[in-house]
Image (cartoon, grey):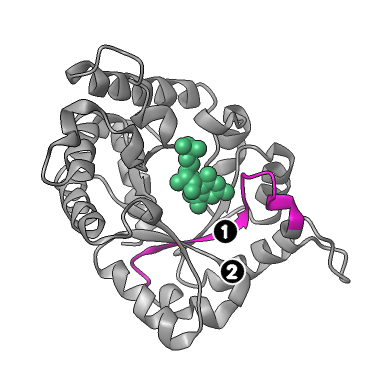
Amino acid sequence: MTFFEELGERISEIDSIVSVGLDPDPSRLPESVRDADLPRWAFNRRIIDATHEHAACYKPNAAFYEDSDGWRALRETVAYAHGKGVPVLLDAKRGDIGNTARQYATVLDEVDAITVNPYLGGDALQPFLDREDKGIIVLCRTSNAGGSDLQDLELASGETVYERVADLADAWNTDDNVGLVVGATAPEELEAIREQVPDLPFLVPGVGAQGGDKEAAVEYGLADGVGLVNSSRGIIFAGEGGPGGEEFFRAAGAAARELKTDLNRYR
Ligand SMILES: O=C(O)c1cc(=O)[nH]c(=O)n1[C@@H]1O[C@H](COP(=O)(O)O)[C@@H](O)[C@H]1O
């Protein structure tokens, strides 16, 4: 079964397309986990307990784990999410020359899907694309303001760079394992890219803390009902400013449920 088939089953089972971003910024962790052996793992475990019924997938961003304790925290987090039956998409935005790419791709032995960067071209992504059972999600039109600096540039052919990426990704999708990252902060581009590549599922970040368009995220993010809309800080730090303790995590659960309900209005 492909990653996207499995994801489709998970989406149907829990009636949710929410991707919960696990970006445990150490400076924002609540008091209750700060003295734990691995605070990020203690935090993620409670977040997973509170949100898993609403999570089609978890998306840890590698930036929050790139130190020795961080890798341990990530490994525990992945195992725990899998124990709850939730797939894990590692947001690592990888892309490098051959031997390095082959090494980077070995992380797919541990997670179900990964984000990759197309800037180095197809050969840099081949070791990822070769993994038929995993999801390979290619950055196409990102949610940040500077996403337009390069991605919106028009090529001599008349297409934009992000349109070229979408076409390439469609061609790379010979094993039905490729998706695209398109930000919810760029709803017009979302619509255009959906028209261009009707069969590719999208990971749509940028709702929540970045204020992106939820309706467009749902309307254009899904291919045959499969796709993900991600929120990280808007869920995991929803309890900030509250009474703390267990309430902090209850707030994360409530935020995940609320996003699920909001998104389902447009499905
Ligand atoms: O690849 C991503 O997931 C990604 C692409 C993009 O265009 N914009 C974007 O925000 N992301 C990631 O999605 C998450 C968004 O986090 P919040 O803004 O806290 O919801 C972060 O982990 C970002 O790195």
The residue under label 1 is: 139
Q: Is residue 210 visible?
A: yes
Please state which amino acid type lies under the numbered disc 2: Pro
- CB under 8 Å between discs 2 and 1: yes
Left-right relation of 50 to 240:
left
Element type where label 1 sits in the image: strand
Q: Position of residue 48 (x, y in %)?
A: 23, 36
Classify 10 Å Cα crowding around label 1: few (below 14), some (14-19), many (20 and above). Answer: many
> Which label number is shown at residue 73?
none
Please state which amino acid type lies under the numbered disc 1: Leu
Residue at 36% from the left image edge and 28% from the top image edge = 237
Q: Which residues are magenta?
A: 131-149
Q: Earlier in the sequence, mark 2 or mark 1?
A: 2
Asked whether 194 falls inside the magenta stretch, the response is no
The residue under label 2 is: 118
Q: Position of residue 2 (x, y in %)?
A: 35, 62
The quadrant the N terminus occupies is bottom left
Which of 41 and 120 lies nearest the eye of the viewer? Answer: 41
In three-dimensional space, the C-alpha distance between marks 2 and 1, rounded to whole angstroms, equals 7 Å
Q: Position of residue 188 (x, y in %)?
A: 74, 40
Element type where label 2 sits in the image: helix
Q: Position of residue 49 (x, y in %)?
A: 18, 32
Q: Is residue 95 above or below residue 163?
A: below
